[in-house]
Image (cartoon, grey):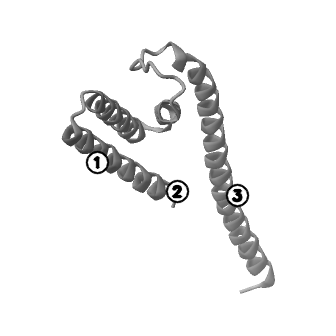
Amino acid sequence: MSDTVANLLSGLVGAIVGGVLSLVGSLVVNRRERRTALRHQLSLLAADLVPRMDEVPRPQLNDRHDDMAKQLDTMSRLGAIAGRDERRLTAEVFQQWLKARNATAREDLSDTTAHLVKADNALEELLELLQQRLN
């Protein structure tokens, strides 16, 4: 094979390999840019939703000075923007805590214990879910 044919084939192979690598690189960059744009849109959506959370009807808590009630309210707000499973689990914890509080007012200790155990189980499930999502 002559030197000119070898040089021509070498240049052709180099051009093909360079074109393929360029295409792969542009696909990777495009995917990252789309993810960044989606995260930006989600952050804008969350910034719009969080102030509206005050307008959503929630169970009324008479004692706003209760630290547990404040923490559960904050957890419900965060769960609302985190995801479907997080919303379900935070709502379960909140409802079980309200039921336990009502059972305490009725002085029904067995119901209080049962509802607190259910709330604890939901919290454990939520923590496991969050640990899985972080890993």
Is 9 placed above or below 106 here? below
Q: Earlier in the sequence, mark 3 or mark 1?
A: 3
The numbered disc on residue 89 is none
Query: Which amino acid type is shown beneath numbered disc 1?
Result: Val
Give residue 4's position: percent from left, percent from top: 80, 78
Spatial CA distance of label 3 from label 2 is: 33 Å
Instruction: State the residue in front, 97 or 105.
Output: 105
Q: Can see residue 78?
A: no
Residue identifier under label 3: 22
Residue bearing the label numbered 2? 134
Q: Which residue is mark 1?
A: 117
- Pick the quarter of the image with the N terminus: bottom right
How far, Cα to Cα, is label 3 from label 1?
A: 57 Å
**Which of the marked residues, 3 or 2, is nearer the chain's N terminus?**
3
| Amino acid at pointer 3 | Ser
Seen from the viewer's position, the closer of residues 117 and 50 is: 117
- In screen coordinates, is 113 left or right of 131? left
Residue lying at 56% horizontally and 22% vertically, measured from the top left: 49
> Toward the viewer: 95 or 108?
108
> Which of the 4 image quarters holds residue 3?
bottom right
Give the crowd class for mark 2: few <14, some 14-19, many >=20 residues within 10 Å: few
* In-image side of 56 versus 32 (left or right): left
Position of 104 compared to 123: left or right? left
Mark 2, secondary structure of its residue: helix
Front label number (1 vs 2) = 1
Q: Residue at x 34, y 48 (%)?
A: 120
